[in-house]
Amino acid sequence: MGYFFNAPSLAAGVGMLSAITAGSGVMGYTLTAAIGGADMPVVITVLNSYSGWALCAEGFMLNNSLMTIVGSLIGSSGAILSYIMCKAMNRSLPSVIMGGFGTSSTGGGEAMAIEGTHTEVMTDGVVDALVNAKNVVVVPGTVSVLHWWG
């Protein structure tokens, strides 16, 4: 890093930029490659937090107060959301980030059998269920989630 500050040539700057870009790519791949299943939303909020902290650092470098404030808000809200999600799963953030690292999944074994019966409901049946329901709860933010109690 000291060489970058002392060498004013364009080649040194391009070389350092290339090295940082390659390092960032390796870090991003190793952070997300082993993650799967229910841990992925936590990793997405962590990456969102990283982008906020990067924006905050950019605001410091450019002496732009607005970018610094917005970046700190994005970074801290992503960090808080990641913490809340980890607490809801009864796990720590390092265990989520490093959860699948170094393990191998072969997918061996027999597939799970599907049990139960399928009940098809047409539009008329849904209308009747909604009309006859005592309470209907519509949950915003989800796609077509309706739950009724008869």
Image (spheres, grey):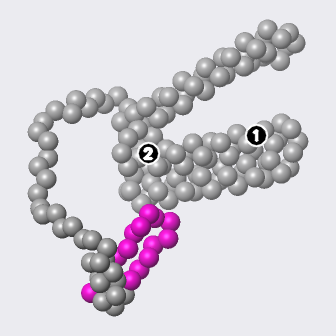
**Badge 1 element:** helix
Per the rendered image, the range of residues in magenta is 136-150
Camera-nearest residue between 91 and 37: 37
Q: x and y percent of residue 24 in the render? A: 60, 27
Circles 2 and 1, Cβ within 8 Å, touching? The answer is no
Q: x and y percent of residue 6 in the render? A: 85, 13
Q: Earlier in the sequence, mark 2 or mark 1?
A: 2
Q: x and y percent of residue 130 in the render? A: 34, 83
- Residue at image position (85%, 9%) is 9
Magenta includes 30? no
Q: Is residue 90 above or below residue 120?
A: above
Q: Is residue 35 left or right of 4 when viewed as pictured?
A: left
Q: Amino acid at mark 2?
A: Met
Magenta includes 145? yes
- Residue at image position (14%, 47%) is 112
Taking the image as drawn, is residue 25 in sight?
Answer: yes
Q: x and y percent of residue 60 in the render? A: 82, 41
Placement of the N terminus among the 4 image quadrants: top right
Mark 1, residue position? 57
Q: Amino acid at mark 1?
A: Ala
Camera-nearest residue between 94 and 44: 44
**Badge 2 element:** helix
Camera-nearest residue between 104 and 87: 104
Mark 2, residue position? 40
- Camera-near label (2 vs 1) is 2
- Residue at image position (33%, 81%) is 127
Taking the image as drawn, is residue 7 in sight?
Answer: no
Give the class, few, some or many, for how many residues have Cα within 10 Å of label 2's Cα (few <14, many ≥20): some
- Residue at image position (58%, 52%) is 79
The image quadrant that residue 14 belongs to is top right
The image quadrant that residue 59 belongs to is top right
